[in-house]
Image: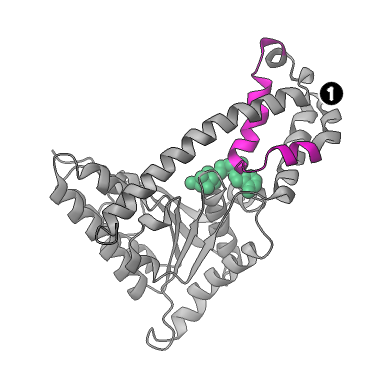
Amino acid sequence: MERPRVASRVAGFKGEAPMDVIAEHVQLPQPRLAACWEAIRVAPGVRERLLSQAVLALTVRRKLPFEVAPIHGLIVLFGPPGTGKTTLARGLANEIAKALTPPGATLVAVDPHALASVAPGQTQKEITRLFQQTLPDLAASGPVIVLLDEVDTLVVDRQRLSLESNPIDVHRATDAALLGLDRLCQSQPNVLLLATTNFPQALDRALLSRADLIEEIGLPDVEARTQIIAEMLQHLARHWPALEGLKQEIKFLAAASEGVDGRRLRKTFIAAIASSLETARDPNRVKSTHIIAALQGLRRDLQAEHEERRRLEALLSHELHPRSG
Ligand SMILES: Nc1ncnc2c1ncn2[C@@H]1O[C@H](COP(=O)(O)OP(=O)(O)O)[C@@H](O)[C@H]1O
Ligand SMILES: [Mg+2]
């Protein structure tokens, strides 16, 4: 069956875009993305490294032949889920657009889940077209920043799908994606790829070796957690002033949330409010004991998730490096 197409969604290139594959296509800078850059607490130096590498890739790279300066225009952010990689990558794209002369870039968010799972047989063609036509066409009119969020999905899904009906198609599609990415990196100095992954070990080694910068975005340290908690309380206290009192417990809460990622840490406060009808009706009644109880609930989930993650990592290393496993 022919998949529907959306020529109108992606202006500025010839032909039609693969519908599900491009999740977003916007002109940068965008005020709504500026907040993303500021929201994520990362180790000192990370922001500056990312931004300078990205700007270099879109400026210096254009002036020097690839043989002289083999810059691929690929930045990889890796780390556990919920550590702010997607948000930071989106914010980074916006900062890059602001830093270029003249300012401006196109952000194209590719959905690797869609790449890996749509219509077998058709997928390979779609992928080839995305990397060999759509993105180069867009790049002809200015810098293009391509966000490949959860790029490991290509391989993770390949593994999952290979147990199902169309292994050849799926493998071909993945190979096409990896090859397309590689070619794009080498031939399009106007394109910068920002890839995020929760499983760097699942990524194609050849691709990873082409990255100009691989930045680990780890779990927030005590300093980062303190800032996240302070910011959460500040927001909440605007509506429920009694929560102002919890600010005295920030240090304690930051210590108690060791090992918790940024997304979950923020959600802990929501879970604490939702922990009883009384607090849900009036969040002013939330005490630090509610937050600690929510953190304890979280620890049980985290434990289960770590086990699932280890299982998946073991599977992946077996799938990718069967001889060493
Ligand atoms: N280091 C952090 N500092 C502040 N907020 C964070 C941090 N990490 C995660 N968050 C919160 O979690 C949300 C989701 O993070 P996300 O970018 O989806 O993480 P990932 O892509 O690593 O799974 C962010 O929008 C932010 O609110
Ligand atoms: Mg993400």
- Which quadrant would the N terminus be assigned to in this image? top left
Going by the numbered disc 1, the residue's amino acid type is: Ala
User: In the figure, is residue 76 to the left or right of 125?
Assistant: right
Q: Where is mark 1, residue-wise?
A: 242
Quarter of the figure with residue 209: bottom left
View extreme (bottom): residue: 68
Regarding residue 26, the answer to whether it shows in the image is: yes
Magenta residues, dominant SS class: helix
Q: Is residue 124 visible?
A: no
Residue 170 among those drawn in magenta: no
- Which sits in the foreground, 71 or 171? 171
Q: Position of residue 283 (x, y in %)?
A: 74, 19
Q: Tell me residue 301's x, y (percent).
A: 52, 31
Indicate left or right for 229 with 241 as reference.
left
User: Which residue occupies the extreme top position in the image?
Assistant: 277
Estimate the x, y position of residue 149 in percent, counting from the top left: 43, 51
In this rendering, is residue 211 above or below 216?
Answer: below
| Residue stretch in magenta | 251-278
Residue in front for this viewpoint, 291 or 180 = 291
At x 42% / y 45%, what residue is drawn? 310
Task: Please report the residue visible at 46 percent of the width from the left and 79 percent of the height from the top.
Answer: 61
Instruction: Tell me residue 240's x, y (percent).
Output: 79, 23
Q: Residues within 10 Å of mark 1 (few under 14, many from 20)?
A: some
